[in-house]
Image (tube, rainbow, N blue to C red):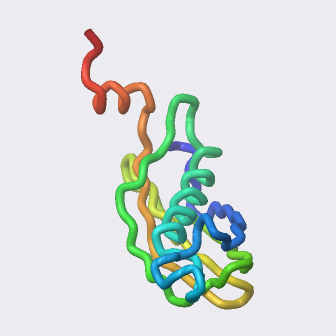
Amino acid sequence: MAGMKAGAVREETVTVGNENAITFLGQDGPRVLSTPHMIGYMERTSRNLALGMLDPGQDTVGTHVNVSHCAAAPLGATVLFRAEVESTEKNRVNFRVQARMGDKVIGEGMHQRAVIDVKAFRERVEGPKE
């Protein structure tokens, strides 16, 4: 985690389409970016930012999400996801995350990820091999 720098930023864009829009209001109802997808893109952007600053064999896993979904992004809209490293503590990285559609903030908040050694994590999760 020595390479993890506060203030580092990554941005990624996503277009709202059938695969990430709500359907529970009906196919003819309003179709907008779903909250779970918005959060997933925030997590992905944060992980992708962290990956460039980690040692070989390390990765991150999400541990906490605290975001607000402030506005709707309709089908066809381009949404910019931004992650910024706010701080680090032990093996945790805290990100400020935001989703924007043009000048409009559609989501924002905080996300935390834990830095893991992939091999050790696999052994912990799967248990010893016989």
Could you say where residue 77 lies in the image, as x and y percent from the top left? 72, 80
Note whether 114 is above or below 125 in the view shown: below
Question: At 67% from the left edge and 73% from the top edge, which residue is drawn?
Answer: 16
Question: At 45% from the left edge and 56% from the top edge, which residue is drawn?
Answer: 93
In this view, the residue in front, 121 or 4, is 121
Question: At 44% from the left edge and 82% from the top edge, which residue is drawn?
Answer: 68
Number of callouts: 0
For this orientation, the residue located farthest to the top is 130
Question: At 52% from the left edge and 67% from the top edge, which residue is drawn?
Answer: 37
Q: Quadrant of the C terminus?
A: top left
Could you say where residue 118 lies in the image, as x and y percent from the top left? 44, 31
Note whether 49 is above or below 95 in the view shown: above
In this view, the residue in front, 77 or 55, is 77
Note whether 125 is above or below 94 in the view shown: above
In this view, the residue in front, 19 or 119, is 19
Could you say where residue 53 lies in the image, as x and y percent from the top left? 61, 45
Quarter assignment of residue 100: bottom right
In this view, the residue in front, 97 or 27, is 27
Could you say where residue 49 lies in the image, as x and y percent from the top left? 62, 54
Left or right: where 31 falls relative to 10 = left
